[in-house]
Structure formats: C-alpha cells, structure tokens
Amino acid sequence: MMPKLLDAVSELLELPSELPPPQTRGRLRKAHRLTQQQVADRLGVRRLAVARWEAGEAEPRAPHREAYVQLLQELAARYPEVASTPADSKDLK
C-alpha cells in the first residue's frame, strides 16, 4: 500500500510546468488566431472550460493540463512578444 502512495506523490511532483497567467493564455491563443472552441475541441473539453481557464476561474486537470501547457508553451515560443507582454496591456482583439 505504501509504494502506491509514494508513487502518487511522485506523480504530483512530475506535473508539467506552471501555466502562464490567465490573461496571457487568451492572448497567446488569439495571436495564433485560434478560437476557444477550436482549443476546446482539440483538448476534448467544452468551450466554457477554456474560457474559465483564460479568466483564471479554473485550472485544467490532467490529462488536459499537460496538453494545454504544451499548447501554450509552443505558442509562447512562436509569439514571444505576446508571452512577455505585461498583464495590464490590451488584449488582442
């Protein structure tokens, strides 16, 4: 029983890197001209979930978290100016 518990703790420690701030999540998506619906469809969640992640009202859970983190990391690499923009800057429309 104890090894399973220790494995569970190890899994927690291996969670992917942190998500960017909620405001940056939406800006990165918009920079690549993706809709919330497109992201939701590819991640297998509802559009409302993506909206809540971007608003900071909820955090994605595994396995969606890993995929979302990867998407945002790749978008940040493509659009470094968007990823580094301060949170109080205007969102891309």
Image: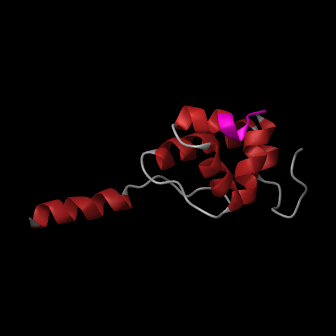
Q: Where is residue 75 in the image (x, y as percent from the top left)?
A: 68, 39
**Per the image, is 5 magenta?**
no
The residue depicted at 87 percent of the width and 46 percent of the height is 92
Drawn side of residue 2 relative to residue 85, left or right: left
Q: Residue at x 81, y 62 (%)?
A: 87
The residues colored magenta run 33-37
Where, by quadrant of the figure, is residue 10 drawn? bottom left
Side of 3 where 50 appears, left or right? right
Figure quadrant of the C terminus? top right
Instruction: Tally the numbered discs.
Output: 0
Q: Which colour assignment does the render follow?
A: secondary structure
Based on the picture, tell me whether residue 34 belongs to the magenta stretch.
yes
Question: Seen in the image, is 1 located left or right of residue 22?
Answer: left
Residue at the (70%, 60%) spot, across then down:
55
Q: In which quarter of the image is the N terminus?
A: bottom left
Query: Quick one: which residue is furthest to the left in this view?
Result: 1
> Which quadrant holds residue 52?
bottom right
Residue 59 percent across, percent down from the top left: 55, 59
Residue 9, x across and y down, in percent:
28, 64
Magenta stretch prevailing secondary structure: loop
Q: Percent from the top left, x then y, of residue 91?
A: 86, 52
Q: Which of 18 and 65 is in front in this view?
A: 65
